[in-house]
């Protein structure tokens, strides 16, 4: 075998037990009756919704769960170093290896690694990992967290002399289109008993596999010690990383002893420069640009928090098509594979650490802003673990070119929640009539908001100890006060949440400060505040995608602010945003009754619904979202007139028309002179099911997945938007259904069920392969509808 580093994914063949089992830490414990699961795994979404659980986390349970995994290590690895890495366990994770206790990690979003060299056996003797996740406080968050080992696990084997974890850090201090410098910092450890001389080689490889530069040096590493060194590689005519052209390189860091490779780490590198200017905004590679961003949480509806990378590929592709170029990871460190995708697909990223510090926030458990709140959360662990968790995030993620800011917190300055200040004798910014008067008033017995400045300075210092190439930011809920307490002064870039009204005034007050929108509504006005002000470089809209939790109250279990629903299906407001953000010509039609509000069906915004099935004579408002300069609307071939976008104050076009059966068509004229069309047509009743799979060839590795989209259609195969037929799914062959989602915020069908109603005519199923090649057949059936099936080949 190779004498270099060995990394093995450890996601398959885990044993799982729901509930406490105090003896399960013991290697010899009998787990034969436990269920087999594949990671990532989230037990919360396997169980029924119940009103007894928290609205904040989507009415799903927490509790305790145990995992056990058997593995072996070949005899020829004897004498190597062995490490186990968990990318995320929610939460209060405790880990044992062969009955040896390794430790506890409270924060459910942190990646952590244990050196298990002294605990493992080699050869024919099995090793056993035991993991306990204790998510006892289900109201510990304002959004759905998931429960269990919900991210990847891997085993790493190295030589006694090796590159440290996070021991390679590549930066690009000098960048131009003609030449760039890649600066490499490498940190080594020698855990052997004698000094060694090691050859350290850094090789930079482009996307075509060509070596474009390298640097080699000899280092002496003392016994049972470590050392750090630097190298520089000059790149001529580099391909610069950007959202429009996310070019990537691979840095291969090699250690050799006596001419033999003993360790190797590969690091993805993007050559790019970032700059923030208080007056002119953000520059990437010297080019001024606006960040058209969204905030995202980490769940995917029916999959819970256990989200495979391919699910994010589908979601990010849709966001990219919308014109989005930036993502804020709210409000916790994301899965590493999501950051990998942001690198390769081209998204600018705010990497965020915390939603609360040492002060506990209100956690709504019976509905949003419904009193009394619960007071569980990370605050219990922040004083002891905050530094470690923040540094872990920065060290783990600092090589990602997509990341342009580190956020140390979200809305920790929310008024009276819990920090208070004499500045507000009466709570004017939080005057919800449903809240007790005491919640809106100054309370000198609560923590003083001036404390936040002290904590923020300390957290910013921790970040700078790990990375000085990116600014530190935070999302301020109450900048009116945080500008006075010194909290804002602790930041390099100040994020304002929903406070566009202060942009101009505060720019005059603090002319040297960089300010942007860190969390914003999807209103047109919020976007114009960015578009029309050079000194505001970004907005991050809440949210890109619907998410479980932060729910208004039973039976609503979902926050519905997204441009896409839980299934990743596009809502009407997706197309409005696309018309504002995308440069690619587009046109989209919706309809609604004239006397309706701007809100359509449940969970679907604005400007109507994408169908043409009404009652004869209904008076309808037609909304056309487009970035083309003019649109002509036709009803059954009859022109209803031409309208120009320049004349539309809301930047979308409208017509009023009496309904008649047939075809409604918009014909748009783009700036390129081409014509673009969108059509709505009257359809008949539901008659059949249509299915589409996004990938019909998968790997038989037990982890690969495909999305199967299901639609209800009429007899001619035309999509029936409003249908809600109950659809039953089944699978034949070496595959399984791991989740079904329709996007309906009030559907309380357990996610473990293999049947679910279509919502507005659609349903999504996630199919995962097993560890055997063959043919997977996914079938969909519904009473009164013609069934359908799709086939997937696994090799």
Image (cartoon, rainbow, N blue to C red):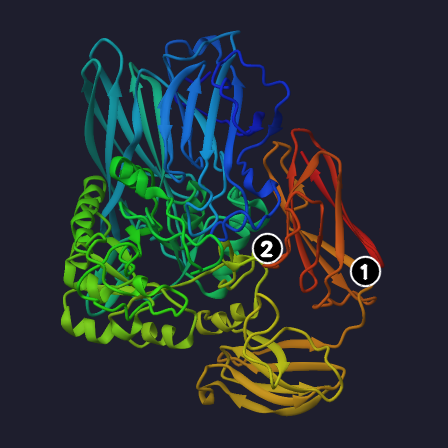
Across and down, in percent, residue 539 comes to: 35, 65
Across and down, in percent, residue 49 comes to: 60, 48
Rendered position, 357 above or below 539: above
- The crowding category of the residue bearing disc 1, from other C-alpha atoms within 10 Å (few below 14, some 14 to 19, many at least 20), is many
Across and down, in percent, residue 540 comes to: 37, 62
- Residue 688: numbered disc: 1
**Residue 213 visible, this orientation:** no
The numbered mark, 1 or 2, whose residue comes first in the sequence reads 2
Spatial CA span between label 1 and label 2 = 21 Å
Q: Is residue 533 left or right of residue 784?
A: left
**Residue 147 visible, this orientation:** yes
Which residue, given by chain and number where applicable, does mark 2 sit on?
A: 567
Out of 48 and 569, give the one closest to the viewer. Answer: 48
Furthest residue toward front? 437
Please report the residue visible at 17 percent of the width from the left and 54 percent of the height from the top: 490
Rendered position, 12 above or below 566: above
Across and down, in percent, residue 50 comes to: 59, 48
Tally of marks: 2
Out of 58 and 409, give the one closest to the viewer. Answer: 58
Q: Is residue 684 left or right of residue 293?
A: right
Please report the residue visible at 20 percent of the width from the left and 41 percent of the height from the top: 462
- Residue 748: numbered disc: none
Q: Is residue 166 left or right of residue 22?
A: left
Quadrant of residue 747 within the rendered picture: bottom right
The secondary structure type at the circle numbered 2 is loop
């Amino acid at each position: 075998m190779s004498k270099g580093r060995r990394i093995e994914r450890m996601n398959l063949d885990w044993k799982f037990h729901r509930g406490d089992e105090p003896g399960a830490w013991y290697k010899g414990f009998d787990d034969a009756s436990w269920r087999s699961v594949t990671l990532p795994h989230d037990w919360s979404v396997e169980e029924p919704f119940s009103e007894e659980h928290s609205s904040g986390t989507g009415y799903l349970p927490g509790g305790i769960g145990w995992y056990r995994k058997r593995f072996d290590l070949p005899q020829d690895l004897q004498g190597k170093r062995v490490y186990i890495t968990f990318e995320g366990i929610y939460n209060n994770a405790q880990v044992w290896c062969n009955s040896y206790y390794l430790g506890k990690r409270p924060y459910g979003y942190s990646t952590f690694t244990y050196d298990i060299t002294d605990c493992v056996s080699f050869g024919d003797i099995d090793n056993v990992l035991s993991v306990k996740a204790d998510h006892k406080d289900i109201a510990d968050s304002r959004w759905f967290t998931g429960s269990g080992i919900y991210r990847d696990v891997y085993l790493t084997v190295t030589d006694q002399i090796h590159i440290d974890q996070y021991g390679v850090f590549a930066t690009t201090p000098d960048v131009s289109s003609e030449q760039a410098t890649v600066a490499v910092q490498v940190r080594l450890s020698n855990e052997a008993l004698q000094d060694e001389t090691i050859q350290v080689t850094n090789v930079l490889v482009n996307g075509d596999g060509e070596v474009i530069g390298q640097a080699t040096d000899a280092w002496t590493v003392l016994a049972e010690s470590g050392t750090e060194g630097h190298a520089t590689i000059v790149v001529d005519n580099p391909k610069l990383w950007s959202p429009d052209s996310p070019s990537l390189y691979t840095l291969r860091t090699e250690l050799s002893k006596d001419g033999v490779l003993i360790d190797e780490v590969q690091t993805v590198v993007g050559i790019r420069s970032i700059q923030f200017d208080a007056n002119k905004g953000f520059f990437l590679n010297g080019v001024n640009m606006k960040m058209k961003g969204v905030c995202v949480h980490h769940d995917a509806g029916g999959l819970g928090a256990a989200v495979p990378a391919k699910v994010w590929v589908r979601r990010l592709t849709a966001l990219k098509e919308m014109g989005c170029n930036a993502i804020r990871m709210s409000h916790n460190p994301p899965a590493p594979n999501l950051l990998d995708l942001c690198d390769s697909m081209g998204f600018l990223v705010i990497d965020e650490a915390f939603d609360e510090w040492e002060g506990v926030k209100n956690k709504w458990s019976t509905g949003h802003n419904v009193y009394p709140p619960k007071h569980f959360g990370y605050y219990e662990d922040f004083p002891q673990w905050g530094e470690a968790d923040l540094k872990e995030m920065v060290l783990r993620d600092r090589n990602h070119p997509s990341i342009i800011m580190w956020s140390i917190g979200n809305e920790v300055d929310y008024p009276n929640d819990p920090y208070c200040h004499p500045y507000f004798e009466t709570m004017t910014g939080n005057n919800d009539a449903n809240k007790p008067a005491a919640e809106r008033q100054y309370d000198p017995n609560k923590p003083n908001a001036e404390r936040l400045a002290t904590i923020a300075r300390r957290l910013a210092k921790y970040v700078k100890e790990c990375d000085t190439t990116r600014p530190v930011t935070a999302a301020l809920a109450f900048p009116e006060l945080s500008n006075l307490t010194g909290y804002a002064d602790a930041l390099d870039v100040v994020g304002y949440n929903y406070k566009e009204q202060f942009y101009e005034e505060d720019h005059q007050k603090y002319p040297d400060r960089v300010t942007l929108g860190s969390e914003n509504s999807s209103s047109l006005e919020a976007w114009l505040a960015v578009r029309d002000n050079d000194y505001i470089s970004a907005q991050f809209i809440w949210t890109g995608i619907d998410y479980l939790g932060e729910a208004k109250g039973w039976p609503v279990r979902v926050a519905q602010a997204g441009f896409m629903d839980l299934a990743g299906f596009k809502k009407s407001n997706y197309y409005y945003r696309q018309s504002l953000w995308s440069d690619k010509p587009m046109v989209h039609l919706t309809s609604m009754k004239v006397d309706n509000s701007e809100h359509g069906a449940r969970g679907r915004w604005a400007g109507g619904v994408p169908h043409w099935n009404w009652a004869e004579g209904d008076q309808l408002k037609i909304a056309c979202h487009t970035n083309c300069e003019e649109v002509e609307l036709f009803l059954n071939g009859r022109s209803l007139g031409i309208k120009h976008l320049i004349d539309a104050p809301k930047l979308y076009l409208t017509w009023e028309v009496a309904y008649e059966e047939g075809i409604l068509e918009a014909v748009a004229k783009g700036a390129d002179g081409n014509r673009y069309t969108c059509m709505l047509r009257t359809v008949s009743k539901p008659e059949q099911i249509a299915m589409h799979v996004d990938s019909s060839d998968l790997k038989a590795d037990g982890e690969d997945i495909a999305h199967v989209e299901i639609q209800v259609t009429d007899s001619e195969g035309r999509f029936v938007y409003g249908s809600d037929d109950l659809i039953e799914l089944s699978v034949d062959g070496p595959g399984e259904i791991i989740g079904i989602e329709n996007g309906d915020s009030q559907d309380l069908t357990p996610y473990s069920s293999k049947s679910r109603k279509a919502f507005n005519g659609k349903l999504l199923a996630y199919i995962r392969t097993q560890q055997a090649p063959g043919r997977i057949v996914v079938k969909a059936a519904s009473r009164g509808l013609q069934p359908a099936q799709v086939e997937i080949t696994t090799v």
